C-alpha cells in the first residue's frame, strides 16, 4: 500500500469497556463510508471508484472485508477489483512490496495497561501457496516520537500465517496465529504503529482485521477536549493526567471546569505556582471547586474572560479572617452568572490588568471582592453591576481598592467600600468615573465613626483627577455616598435626584450662574451625626471664561444656594476649595461670592485715548455702597487694584463715574470694577478689554518655572536712560522684592521666596510695561 495514500486517524472518543478494558483506537473491516474514520480511500486497481478498505468502529467487528495487504479480492483469486493498489493505480495484482499501512500517533499519557491487538486473515485456496521466500509483513511501533522498531513479523505458507514476536511477551509462545499483541511500555506519552510489507504476490488475498488499542484506565474521553478538567488523579492543575486531553493548559487554552463534577477532584492551586489559561468557564451546579485560599502566593492568571456559573465554584477563602488568600489576575471580563456567593473572595486579591476594555458582570445584585486592583496601561473597566469591597467586614488597614493605573467607570452603579479605614482606598494613577447627571454613578463608603481623611478618587473621562476628601472629625456618618458630574457653561442639567435643584440663585434672589463652577457634587449620609472637613476639587476649564478668585462651596437648602458656614480656603494651584466643620449634606457646587451686593450697575467701559485708558461706569441705584475699586489684568485671570473711587453711598438716582489709567499695560489689558459695601461685602462687574499701543514692552519667561529662575527682556522703541524697575508681589498682594536695573535684560530668582504664585510688575521709568502672574512649582 502506498505510504502517501493511507494514513489512518487513531484516537476515538468513547468510554466503551471491553473485558475491563477501554478501546481507544480501532480499525475494523466492514467497509461502509460511515465507518471510514476520516480515511481517504485509495483507487481500485482497475479504475476510478474508491474502495472502503479501512474503516473505524466503536466495537470490534466481524465480517468479510478488512484491510487488504496484497493481491486479489475476497470473492475470487483474480487481481484487479476491490484491492489496494501498489505504486500503480491501474495495475493488477496489487503489489504491496515496500509499502506500509500507517496509523496516526495516539496520546497515551496517563493511561495504564495500554495494549495493541491485531488479527490477520488470508486466502490460500487460489493458485498461490502463500508467502514466497523473503516475503513477510512487519509490525512496527514508535514510542514518544522515536524511530519505528519491529515488534512482530508475519510469515508462512499455506493455511494460516503466523506472527513471530521480536520480544516474546511473558507467558506466551514466540509465535502466534491470532491475535498479535503488543504491551505498550508504562509511561509512554505518544504511541504510533504501522505495518510494512515485502510482498510481491498477486495470487493471494491477505487481510489485517480488528486492529485496536485498549487501556485498563477508565473515566477518560478520547481523544479528549483541550482544557476540560477531569480531576481523575488528584487536584494538581499541572498534572496532565487530570485533563481530558491529558495536556496541561497554556495561556492560549480555554479551560472549562465541568458541571456535576462530583466524582472527581477539585483544582487546588499550590503556592508559588501560576496556573494560566485563556478563557476560564466554571459550569453548572457541582460540588467541586477551584480553590486558591490560604496563601497570597497562590495565583491564577486568566488571559481572557472568566465566567462563573457554578455554586461555590471559585473558592479563594480559607475561612479565617485576616489571613491572606490567593490572587486572580484577569485580563478579560469578569462574569458571575450565579449569585454573589459563588465567588468566595475571603482575603483574596483580584487584579484587572492589560490594555483591553474589561467589564464586571453578575446575575446577582452585586459582586463582592476583598482586594480589587485596577492596573491597566490602557482601556477601561466598566461596572455593569454594583461592586462591593470587603463585604464581609474582614477589616484591616491594608489597601482594599487600589488604583495603580487605569479607570473604573461606575456606569450608573454603586461602588461600596465596607471598610471604614481611610487607607482602604489608595491611588497612584487613574480613578473612579462618576460623571452621570442622574447621580447614579456613586461611591458609598462605610465610614461610620472612623475619623480621618477619606479620599474619593474621582477622575474625569479625560483622566483629569478631581478627588473629593471627606475628613471626619467627630460623630458617626455611617454610610457616606458621593457622586459628581460636570455641566456646560449654563450649569444644566441641575440635579434632580436625590434632591431637586431648580436654579442657581443665592439667598438674596440673584442669579449667580455666571460665577459658578460647571460641576455639581451630591453628598449624602445615613448616620445621625457627623462633622467633617470637606475638600472639593474641580477640573481645569470647568469655569465659563476663566478661573475666578474666591470660589467657595455652596450648599442647596432648601430652595436656594447658601454659602457654607466658617472660613473657606481656595487653592487655585490645585483647583480645590477647603470647607471646614460641615454637618449638613446635600447637593453642592462652587461659586465666586454667591450673594450679590446692593448696587445696580448699568454700564462699565474702558476706552484707549492717547496713551491712557478712560474708565467709565454708571449706576442706577446704590444701597449702603462704600467705594469702587478698578482692577486690571494682563492675562484676564490675575487682577490687581489700580484705582480707588468713593461712591454715592445711598442713592436712587443715576450716577456717573470717570477715572483714567495713566500708565496702561502694553498690548491687551483687562479691567473690572469691584464694588464694596459698608459691611465689606463685595462683587465684581463684567470684564472688559482694551488694546494699547505703547512704544515700550517687556517679556518674561519661562512661566511657569520649576527651578525659580526667570528672565525679563525689555524692548524700548526709543533710546532712553530710564531704569528698569522689577517689583515682585506674593499671592496675597504683598510686595516681597523691588529692584532697579540699568540693563534691558534681567535675570530673576524666586528660590528665596519659596514655591507658589507671584505677580511681577516691570516698569520703564514711570511707565508700567508688564504685569504678569508667575507660577513657581
Image (tube, grey):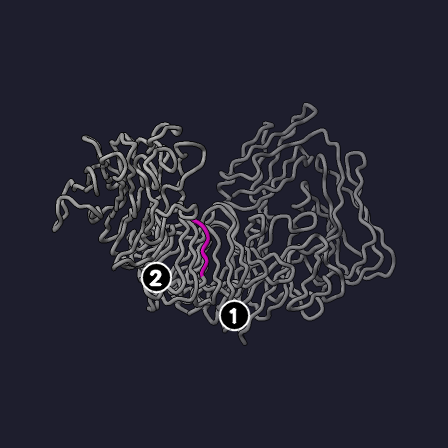
Q: State whether residue 23 is above or below residue 159.
A: below
**Nearer to me, 674 or 516:** 516
Which percent across, then down, holds residue 292?
A: 34, 60
- Whether residue 548 sits left or right of residue 280 in the image: it is right
Q: Please say whether residue 305 is one of the residues in the magenta stretch.
A: yes
Q: Which residues are magenta?
A: 303-308
Asked whether residue 372 appears in the rendered view, the answer is yes
Residue placed most toward the observer, 550 or 68: 68
Q: Is residue 326 magenta?
A: no
What is the crowding at mark 1: few (fewer than 14 residues within 10 Å), some, or many (at least 20)? some
Please give the count of numbered marks on the rendered protein. 2
Residue sitting at x 49%, y 41%: 751
Upstream in sequence: badge 2 or badge 1: 2
661, above or below 620, in the image? above
Residue for point 30% across, 53% down: 23
Q: Tag on residue 351? A: none
In what quadrant of the picture does the N terminus appear?
A: top left
Q: Is residue 202 left or right of residue 551?
A: left
Q: Kindly identify which residue carries mark 2.
A: 291
Between residue 106 and residue 70, name the one nearer to us. Answer: 70
> Residue sitting at 32 percent across and 63 percent down?
264
Mark identifier at residue 479: 1
Please identify the quarter of the rendering in which residue 234 is found: bottom left
Q: Position of residue 609 (x, y in %)?
A: 81, 36
User: Label 2: how many residues lie within 10 Å, few (<14), some (14-19) or many (20+)?
Assistant: many
Q: Are marks 2 and 1 in contact (CB under 8 Å)?
A: no
Which secondary structure lies at badge 1?
strand
Describe residue 69's horizontal placement relative to residue 452 as left or right.
left
Considering every residue shown, the one lying at the far bottom of the view is 528
Residue sitting farthest toward the top: 719
**Up/down of 696 relative to 728, above or below:** above
Amino acid at each position: 500500500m502506498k505510504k502517501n495514500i493511507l494514513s489512518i486517524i487513531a484516537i476515538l472518543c468513547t468510554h466503551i469497556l471491553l473485558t475491563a478494558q477501554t478501546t481507544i483506537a480501532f480499525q475494523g473491516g466492514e467497509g461502509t463510508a460511515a465507518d471510514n474514520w476520516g480515511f481517504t480511500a485509495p483507487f481500485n486497481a482497475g479504475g476510478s471508484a474508491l474502495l472502503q478498505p479501512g474503516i473505524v468502529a466503536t466495537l470490534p467487528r466481524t465480517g468479510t472485508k478488512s484491510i487488504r495487504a496484497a493481491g486479489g479480492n475476497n470473492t475470487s483469486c483474480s487481481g484487479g477489483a476491490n484491492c489496494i493498489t501498489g505504486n500503480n493505480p491501474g495495475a493488477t495484482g496489487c503489489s504491496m512490496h515496500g509499502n506500509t499501512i500507517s496509523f496516526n500517533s495516539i496520546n497515551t499519557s496517563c493511561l495504564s495497561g495500554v495494549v495493541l491487538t491485531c488479527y490477520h486473515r488470508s486466502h490460500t485456496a487460489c493458485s498461490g501457496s502463500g508467502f514466497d521466500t523473503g516475503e513477510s509483513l512487519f509490525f512496527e511501533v514508535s514510542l514518544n516520537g522515536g524511530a519505528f522498531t519491529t515488534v512482530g513479523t508475519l510469515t508462512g505458507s499455506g493455511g494460516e500465517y503466523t506472527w513471530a514476536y521480536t520480544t516474546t511477551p511473558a507467558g506466551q509462545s514466540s509465535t502466534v496465529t491470532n491475535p498479535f499483541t503488543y504491551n505498550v511500555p508504562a509511561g509512554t506519552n505518544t504511541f504510533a504503529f504501522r505495518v510494512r510489507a515485502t510482498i510481491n504476490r498477486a495470487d493471494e488475498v491477505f487481510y489485517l482485521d480488528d486492529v485496536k488499542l485498549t487501556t485498563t484506565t477508565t473515566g477518560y474521553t478520547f481523544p479528549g477536549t483541550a482544557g476540560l478538567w477531569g480531576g481523575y488523579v488528584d487536584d494538581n492543575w499541572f498534572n496532565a493526567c487530570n485533563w481530558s486531553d491529558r495536556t496541561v493548559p497554556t495561556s492560549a487554552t480555554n479551560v472549562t471546569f465541568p458541571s456535576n463534577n462530583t466524582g472527581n477532584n477539585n483544582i487546588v492551586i499550590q503556592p508559588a505556582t501560576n496556573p494560566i489559561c485563556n478563557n476560564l468557564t466554571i459550569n453548572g451546579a457541582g460540588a467541586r471547586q477551584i480553590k486558591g485560599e490560604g496563601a497570597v502566593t497562590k495565583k491564577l492568571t486568566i488571559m481572557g474572560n472568566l465566567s462563573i456559573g457554578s455554586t461555590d465554584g471559585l473558592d479563594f477563602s480559607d475561612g479565617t479572617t485576616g489571613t491572606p488568600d490567593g490572587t486572580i489576575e484577569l485580563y478579560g471580563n469578569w462574569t458571575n452568572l450565579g449569585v454573589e456567593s459563588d465567588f468566595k473572595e475571603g482575603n483574596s486579591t483580584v487584579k484587572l490588568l492589560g490594555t483591553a476594555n474589561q467589564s464586571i458582570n453578575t446575575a446577582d445584585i452585586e459582586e463582592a471582592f476583598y482586594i480589587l486592583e485596577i492596573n491597566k496601561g490602557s482601556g477601561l473597566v466598566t461596572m455593569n453591576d454594583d461592586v462591593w469591597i470587603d463585604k464581609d467586614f474582614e477589616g484591616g488597614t491594608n489597601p482594599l481598592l487600589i488604583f495603580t493605573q487605569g479607570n473604573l467607570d461606575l456606569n450608573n452603579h454603586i461602588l461600596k467600600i465596607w471598610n471604614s479605614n481611610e487607607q482602604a482606598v489608595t491611588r497612584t494613577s487613574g480613578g473612579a468615573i462618576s460623571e452621570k447627571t442622574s447621580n447614579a454613578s456613586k461611591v458609598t463608603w462605610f465610614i461610620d465613626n472612623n475619623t480621618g481623611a477619606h479620599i474619593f478618587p474621582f477622575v474625569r473621562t479625560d483622566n483629569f483627577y478631581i478627588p473629593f476628601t471627606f475628613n471626619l472629625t467627630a460623630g458617626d456618618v455611617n454610610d457616606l455616598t458621593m457622586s459628581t458630574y460636570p455641566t456646560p457653561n449654563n450649569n444644566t442639567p441641575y440635579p434632580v435626584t436625590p434632591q431637586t435643584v431648580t436654579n442657581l440663585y443665592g439667598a438674596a434672589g440673584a442669579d449667580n450662574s455666571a460665577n459658578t463652577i460647571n460641576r455639581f457634587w451630591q453628598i449624602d449620609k445615613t448616620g445621625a451625626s457627623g462633622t467633617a472637613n470637606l475638600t472639593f476639587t474641580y477640573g481645569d476649564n470647568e469655569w465659563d471664561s476663566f478661573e475666578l478668585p474666591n470660589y467657595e462651596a455652596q450648599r442647596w437648602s432648601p430652595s436656594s444656594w447658601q454659602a457654607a458656614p466658617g472660613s473657606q480656603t481656595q487653592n487655585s494651584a490645585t483647583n480645590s476649595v477647603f470647607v471646614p466643620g460641615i454637618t449638613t449634606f446635600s447637593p453642592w457646587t462652587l461659586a465666586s461670592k454667591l450673594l450679590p451686593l446692593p448696587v445696580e450697575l448699568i454700564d462699565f467701559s474702558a476706552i484707549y485715548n492717547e496713551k491712557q485708558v478712560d474708565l467709565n461706569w454708571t449706576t442706577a441705584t446704590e444701597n449702603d455702597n462704600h467705594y469702587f475699586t478698578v482692577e486690571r489684568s494682563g492675562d484676564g485671570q490675575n487682577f490687581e487694584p489700580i484705582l480707588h473711587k468713593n461712591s454715592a453711598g445711598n442713592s436712587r438716582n443715576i450716577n456717573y463715574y470717570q477715572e483714567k489709567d495713566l500708565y496702561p499695560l502694553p498690548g491687551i489689558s483687562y479691567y473690572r470694577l469691584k464694588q464694596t459695601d459698608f459691611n465689606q461685602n463685595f462683587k465684581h462687574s463684567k470684564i472688559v478689554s482694551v488694546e494699547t499701543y505703547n512704544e515700550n514692552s517687556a517679556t518674561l519667561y519661562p512661566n511657569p518655572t520649576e527651578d525659580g529662575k526667570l528672565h525679563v527682556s525689555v524692548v524700548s522703541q526709543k533710546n532712553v536712560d530710564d531704569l528698569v524697575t522689577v517689583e515682585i508681589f506674593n499671592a496675597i498682594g504683598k510686595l516681597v522684592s523691588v529692584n532697579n536695573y540699568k540693563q534691558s535684560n534681567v535675570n530673576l530668582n524666586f528660590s528665596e521666596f519659596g514655591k507658589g504664585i507671584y505677580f511681577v510688575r516691570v516698569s520703564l521709568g514711570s511707565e508700567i510695561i508688564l504685569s504678569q502672574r508667575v507660577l513657581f512649582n
